[in-house]
Amino acid sequence: MHSRRLGTHGPLVSAIGLGCMGMSQGYGEVDQRDALATLDAALDAGVTLLDTAMSYGAGANERLLAAVLAGRREEVVLATKFGIVRDGAEVRVDARPEHVRGFLEASLSRLGVEHVDLYYLHRVDPDVPIAETIGVMGELVAEGKVTHLGVSETTATELAQAVAMHPIAAVQLEWSLSWRECEDEVIPAARRLGVGIVPYSPLGRGLLTGTLTADSAGKASMRSRDGRFAAGSLEPNLRLVDAVTAIARDRGITAAQLALAWLLAQGEDVVPIPGTTRPDRLAENIAAAEVSLSADELARLEQAAGRDAWAGDRFSFAAPGTQRTAQ
């Protein structure tokens, strides 16, 4: 597995990481033995970046990772996040400075580790200036409990405010062939500021795998709130996926591999974190790191399934307020 550095002075990580959320929420029940087998397979294959959050499964995801970390901590660049709080059916954002330390201590306990390599602010608290939250996060770095800081789903202005308070290694955001809004402001800002880019949902919540059908696409809860899977949008989007699949077939790879290779081709500062619960899908995803796309292939892909071709906003029929709390 090739390596890439997150940010100007951030950690060196595998070119493709593993997003672990789906092992605990969002896409249906998962056999935890399968999840653990996938985590071990990822490390065996050279994946070093494992991404979780205190909110995933209301802490269950961090406890799941603890079983693998117990024997393989030195192999992992461990990323977790705080700021989205799940309390039963309630989901809220809380990044108040006085709560940050407690959130970290709870994550460390669930993970069974003494420090986190990359600690993200999962969502900006609308009631708290981001600089205040980052200031407390910086104290955790000084204490050795956190090595690098990250932010997730910020605006370009918020990202600059964060960097002004403390070096930021990575910004996590949704970015894929089927969702490219971040290219307008946040990606350019990250590059000006020397911040690495970690796309989540790089396969469009499964849309870009080429395996979903009109019947199966909307069944997972993470897709039920996504406008790309709504009636009137899903059908034309699946036709675009067919076009992507045709290009992939010509290259001898899968649609998922083509979608990931496209992201990797956007710059050496990009480290996507596709999620999966199956070792075979994991192997498919990480093989994309060996795919180098030509300028002609990139142009063909842009022509067949460019930014303006996709239908539906990722939050177009989400519940009020979820723009800041989804994922």
Image: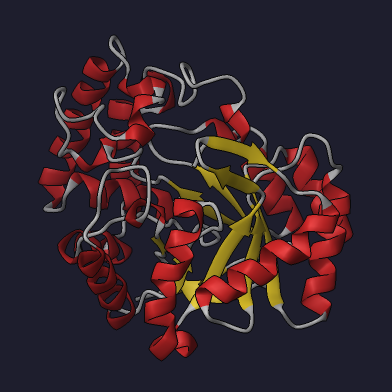
In the image, 116 versus 30, the foreground residue is 30
> Residue at coordinates 87% horizontally, 56% vertically from top-left?
164
**Residue 36 visible to the viewer:** yes
Task: Establish if 156 lies above or below 258.
Answer: above
Task: Kindly give the residue lying farthest to the top in the view shown.
Answer: 232
> Residue at coordinates 85% horizontally, 57% vertically from top-left?
98
Residue 170: horizontal and vertical position, in percent? 63, 59
> Residue at coordinates 44% horizontally, 60% vertically from top-left?
60
In the image, 184 versus 140, the foreground residue is 140
Q: How is the image coloured?
A: secondary structure
Which quadrant holds the N terminus? bottom left
**Residue 8 visible to the viewer:** no
Name the image quarter holding residue 245. Answer: top left
Left or right of 69? Residue 247 is left
Left or right of 33? Residue 302 is right
Residue 137: horizontal and vertical position, in percent? 79, 64
How many numbered marks have been drawn onto this rendered protein structure? 0
> Residue at coordinates 57% horizontally, 44% vertically from top-left?
87
Name the image quarter holding residue 195. Answer: bottom right
Task: Establish if 28 lies above or below 111.
Answer: above
In the image, 76 versus 34, the foreground residue is 34
Residue 181: horizontal and vertical position, in percent? 55, 30
Left or right of 298? Residue 151 is right
